[in-house]
Image (tube, helix red, strand yellow):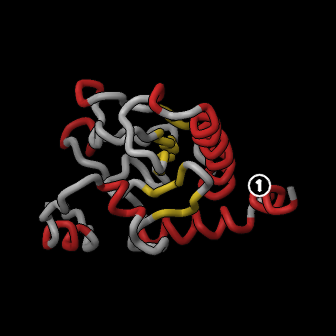
Amino acid sequence: MNHLWSPWRMEYIDNNMKESGCAFCLELTKEDGPDNLIITRGKRAFVILNRYPYTSGHIMVVPFMHVSSLNELDEECRAEIIELTNQFLLVLENEYHPDGFNVGMNLGEAAGAGIAEHLHMHIVPRWSGDTNFMTALAETRVLPEALRVTYMRLKSTWKNSEITAKKEEG
């Protein structure tokens, strides 16, 4: 018999009590770091690592405003979400070298939104063949690195990227 070993899952099993309130809003109240998984904050939106990722590097761009639809955001916020998405596509490309990306929003519970009340944009790096028997048959994802490692890689790449340097110059 083959065994899958994922020791980081024990933290999830031990702490499966959900906090009340919006997960994104709760993370915003904490100091940025590997515990809240926020990589950067803009003026109107932030980038956070998905705590339950589809693949390594799965991040989300989230407005500070707690809204469920795009039309509730002002034009500047919508623009910042797209700009942060674009910048992090480059960060992920530089750090993980995926074969492609899935980028999008699930608007509403019926569309698959896990946190339907707080709009967010998913960026999911994809590799040819990343859907294997585990996903197809067992509905299970196998991630090759711990979330803290992914966080530190993306945070470092973001800090050292040309994008950040250009932003600070301008």
Q: Position of residue 59 (x, y in %)?
A: 48, 51
- Quadrant of res 52: bottom left
Q: Residue at x 20, y 38 (%)?
A: 137
Q: Position of residue 91 (x, y in %)?
A: 66, 53
Q: Position of residue 114 (x, y in %)?
A: 27, 41
Which quadrant is home to the C terminus?
A: bottom right
Q: Within 10 Å of the Cα at label 1, are there few (<14), some (14-19), or many (20+) other Cα atoms?
A: some
Asked whether residue 89 is in view, the answer is yes
Relative placement, left or right, of 91 versus 105 is right
Q: Nearer the viewer, residue 75 or 141?
A: 75
Q: Residue at x 63, y 37 (%)?
A: 76
Q: How many marks?
A: 1
Q: Residue at x 19, y 62 (%)?
A: 19
SS class of the residue under badge 1? helix
Q: Residue at x 69, y 54 (%)?
A: 94
* Amino acid under disc 1: Ile
Which residue is labeled 1 in the image? 163
Relative placement, left or right, of 149 versus 10 is right
Residue 120, compared with residue 8, is above or below; it is above
Residue 30, compared with residue 102, is above or below; it is below
Q: Position of residue 31 (x, y in %)?
A: 45, 74
Asked whether residue 99 is in view, the answer is no
Residue 102, compared with residue 11, is above or below; it is above
- Quadrant of res 40: bottom right
Extreme residue in the right direction? 169
Relative placement, left or right, of 24 versus 94 is left
Which quadrant is home to the N terminus?
A: bottom left
